[in-house]
Image (cartoon, helix red, strand yellow):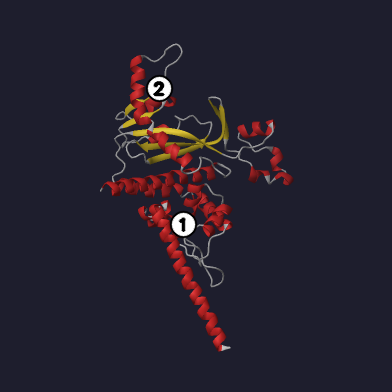
Amino acid sequence: MRDIWYNSSQRRASAMQIAFWDESLRLENLSQLGDSLERLNGAINWEIFRPALTKVFKKEHKGAGGRPPYDYLMLFKVLVLQRIYNLSDEQAEYQINDRMSFMRFLGLHLGDRVPDAKTIWLFRDTLTKANVIRELFDVFGQQLKDANLITHTGTIVDATFVEAPRQRNSKEEREEIKSGNVPEAWKKPENIHKLHQKDVDATWTRKGNQTYYGYKDHVKADAESKLITDYAVTTASTHDSQPMPAMINETDKVVYADSAYWGQPVAEALPPHVENQIHERGTKKNPLTEEQKANNKRKSKIRCRVEHIFGFMTQSMHGLTVRSIGLERAEFNIGLTNLIYNLCRFEFLHRSVSTTA
């Protein structure tokens, strides 16, 4: 009996050793093939986010029973993975179990516990209610400033649509929502579930021949590094120019924006020291002169860099959408998108410097 137990233990130890070497070899192959997550992990000092995360979850785990809590920084990196690959909570749980590159990014090994979909949802929901995304964005923003990556030689302001799940409401329900009220029918006990399934904050708008439903991401970016230095989240029907005055400050020297921002209200809102490089807009009665067209063309060479930001979010981050309901969750998800864009952009700049050095 003793020999049987010994042989069984020996086989288990041998199997674990084989699994360890197999994991190491696979990770080594991933590195040789070019693991973008490994590069991101190596470029970012993730510990700078821990104080803000710990402050949200300051209640210590009490009692000896139950499982110990997951590391908050690891769960935050799960949200990073979700946003880069546009994964639902269920998809994230599956992919972490399935992909070794995900496990390595999170600091997990084959025998470690993987957070389930419910844990991921609760973590994100807690961060959302704590309104911590702005602090996390600013923490990394300070690191960008310390690295002298924000030059302030030029500032670009622009906005893009972030689409939300489209609602199927009656005409009467739409009218009540537009007036700022919750439809009376939704308040009935048998319809109370609709309050959790309907987005009363997102709005419809039209641009050209296309309609949009959801929110807007207004960004302020450094013209040289193409890093986002500030942002604002509004409903889709909010005009692009409305959040702009609050985003411009004493550090900005030159401001570039498209013709949607052209006009007296914006010009008057700019501080006196800021050079106005906003595209001029003509009308049918007062078309642009050839000189004004030439000036707009010159401005476009710099202003168009903000489109690279939105292009990266659309292509490399698999789309500009929110799966959530309500402005509060949209603010968190869009703020997280802007932060993760900066993380990826920083890794690119870091790699570019390392290559040329």
Q: Can you identify the residue that label 1 sits on?
A: 101
Q: Quadrant of residue 66?
A: bottom right
The label nearer to you, 2 versus 1, is: 1
Q: Is residue 214 above or below residue 49?
A: above
Q: Can you identify the residue that label 2 sits on?
A: 264
Q: Quadrant of the N terminus?
A: bottom right
Q: Residue at x 29, y 35 (%)?
A: 153
Crowd class of label 2 (few under 14; some 14 to 19; many from 20; radius 10 Å):
few
Q: Residue furthest top?
A: 285
Q: Quadrant of residue 167?
A: top right
Q: Is residue 115 above or below residue 154?
A: below
Q: Residue furthest right?
A: 190
Q: Residue furthest left?
A: 357
The residue type indicated by label 2 comes to Gln
Q: Residue at x 38, y 44 (%)?
A: 345
Crowd class of label 1 (few under 14; some 14 to 19; many from 20; radius 10 Å):
many
Q: Secondary structure at mark 1?
A: helix
Residue 205, numbered label = none
Residue 173 in view, yes or no: yes
Q: Secondary structure at mark 2?
A: helix
Q: Quadrant of residue 50?
A: bottom left
Q: Position of residue 48 (x, y in %)?
A: 37, 55
The residue type indicated by label 1 comes to Ser
Q: CA distance from mark 2 to mark 1?
A: 52 Å
Q: Position of residue 106 (x, y in %)?
A: 46, 59
Q: Position of residue 353 (x, y in %)?
A: 29, 47
Q: Residue at x 49, y 43 (%)?
A: 334
Q: Position of residue 34 (x, y in %)?
A: 40, 52
Camera-side residue of 129 and 124: 124
- 181 with respect to 22 (left or right): right
Q: Is residue 186 above or below residue 73?
A: above
